Amino acid sequence: MKTSGDLLRRDHTAEAIAQPLAAAKSHSYLGDFVLGAVDGAVTTFAIVAGAAGAGLSNGVVIVLGLANVLADGFSMAAGNFLRARADQQLLQRFRRLEETHIDRIPEGEREEIRQILRGKGFEGEMLERIVQVITEDRQRWVNTMLTDEWGLQLQPPSPWRAALATLGAFVLAGLVPLVPMVILLHRRASESFTASAIMTGATFFAIGVIRGRVVDQRPLGSGMETLLIGGSAAVLAFLVGWFLQGLAMS
């Protein structure tokens, strides 16, 4: 039977250390997925809850819900695409800037590297040696300035992947609250509301469990946290629909 010490040694071999370090340099699309899924479930269930509070029919809810899933999902994906695209363009801008500075004022750029390393605790001969090693390689030099001076990620997210992760999660989670409405098509939204609420709550919890497993948090706690946050938004939407139900009937 392996002890905790054996597991720690296994996780700290050269190969085991190299894998997470390489993965840390690339963007994780988990955040895009979770954001899209939670927003899709919340906004669609908000329509269901508001319609239930206002006493509207399931047919109306389905039309409004599908319009929301497609239009709002696309809008959110487009926004995430533009954000990721802006990250790429910002990286390119500062890369050109640092390359220009290295060409025009190399000694000044070396001094910046020196001060960055001094801030990390390096001094004397060791400091000068590391400065030399970094500045001997132009790409390494520029990359060091990008990460340590500007705090940029060298491999920003792919705009298309970020957008697709958001859109896919939004559509999948956003359709869940509408399932009972489709099954009970010819009834009022208030009659399907309980089933929709249960399915949406289960979706929130599942999203949280997935997030918890990926980020190494307790799945149950992460699931309950996501359920609480998403459920709060849904309750707010229901109260608004109930409070304004007179407008829907006018």
Image: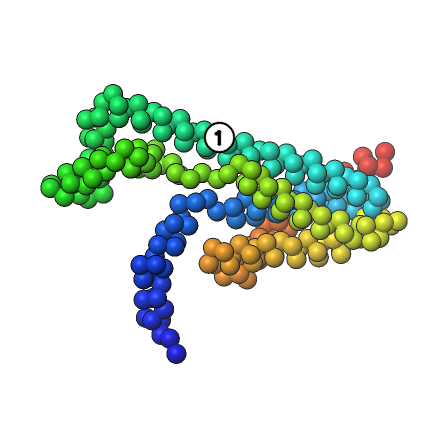
Q: Residue furthest right?
A: 186
Residue 75: x, y in percent? Answer: 63, 34
Q: Residue furthest top?
A: 104
Residue 140: x, y in percent? Answer: 29, 37
Instruction: Please tell me whether residue 204 is drawn above or below residue 88 in the rendered image.
Output: below
Q: Residue furthest left?
A: 125
| Left or right: residue 238 compared with residue 39 | right
Going by the numbered disc 1, the residue's amino acid type is Ala
Q: Quick check: can you spot residue 210?
A: yes
Front-lying residue, 112 or 100: 100
Q: Quadrant of the N terminus?
A: bottom left
Q: Which residue is mark 1?
A: 86
| Left or right: residue 111 compared with residue 180 | left
Query: Residue 124's image quarter?
Result: top left
Residue 222: x, y in percent? Answer: 53, 57
How dense is the environment of label 1, judged by Cα within 10 Å: few (below 14), some, or many (20 and up)?
some
Front-lying residue, 200 or 249: 200
Q: Quadrant of the C terminus?
A: top right
The secondary structure type at the circle numbered 1 is: helix
Residue plotted at (30% across, 23% down): 100
Query: Residue 107's image quarter?
Result: top left
| Left or right: residue 75 compared with residue 2 | right
